[in-house]
């Protein structure tokens, strides 16, 4: 019982499995940014927690920001996208 409780997730802490899944999602979103030449992978940061992707950083245009959100939403496993990207 103690082991199961230790692996359970809470609203503020992810389980080990969720952490691994979140890392995979983050990597896939970043890879999508690198593949798409309209999104600056260097200027936009990606963090994932329990399937929710948070984008932050700077975009040159509103279109770049929207494209980053769309790319992130299309990654398998993404439950939601929070857009904190600011325009330069």
Image (spheres, grey):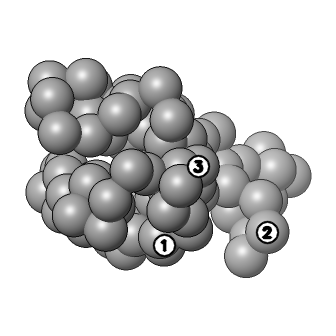
Q: CA distance from mark 2 to mark 1?
A: 17 Å
Residue designated by label 1:
82
Residue 74 in view, yes or no? yes
| Label 2 CA crowd tier, 10 Å (few <14, some 14–19, many 20+) | few
Horizontally, residue 36 falls left or right of residue 27, namely left
In the image, residue 88 lies at what x, y percent? Answer: 53, 55
Which mark sits nearer the N-terminus, 3 or 1?
Answer: 3
Q: CA distance from mark 3 to mark 1?
A: 12 Å
Under tag 2, what secondary structure? Answer: loop
Camera-side residue of 28 and 60: 60
Horizontally, residue 60 falls left or right of residue 28, namely right
| Label 1 CA crowd tier, 10 Å (few <14, some 14–19, many 20+) | some
Direction right: furthest residue: 2
Residue designated by label 3:
57
Seen at 47% across and 26% down, the residue is: 42
Seen at 48% across and 72% down, the residue is: 82
Which mark sits nearer the N-terminus, 2 or 1?
Answer: 2
Which mark sits nearer the N-terminus, 2 or 3?
Answer: 2
Q: Is residue 37 above or below residue 7?
A: above
Residue 26 occupies quadrant: top left
Seen at 49% across and 42% down, the residue is: 44
In the image, residue 79 lies at what x, y percent? Answer: 33, 70
Q: Nearer the viewer, mark 2 or mark 1?
A: 1
Residue 1 occupies quadrant: bottom right
Q: Nearer the viewer, mark 2 or mark 3?
A: 3
Residue designated by label 2:
12
């Amino acid at each position: 019982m103690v082991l199961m409780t230790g692996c359970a997730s809470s609203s503020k802490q992810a389980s080990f499995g969720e952490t691994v899944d979140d890392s995979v999602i983050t990597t896939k979103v970043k890879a999508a940014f690198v593949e798409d030449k309209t999104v600056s992978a260097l200027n936009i940061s990606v963090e994932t927690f329990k399937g929710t992707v948070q984008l932050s950083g700077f975009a040159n245009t509103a279109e770049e920001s929207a494209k980053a959100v769309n790319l992130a939403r299309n990654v398998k496993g993404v439950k939601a996208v929070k857009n904190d990207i600011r325009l330069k």
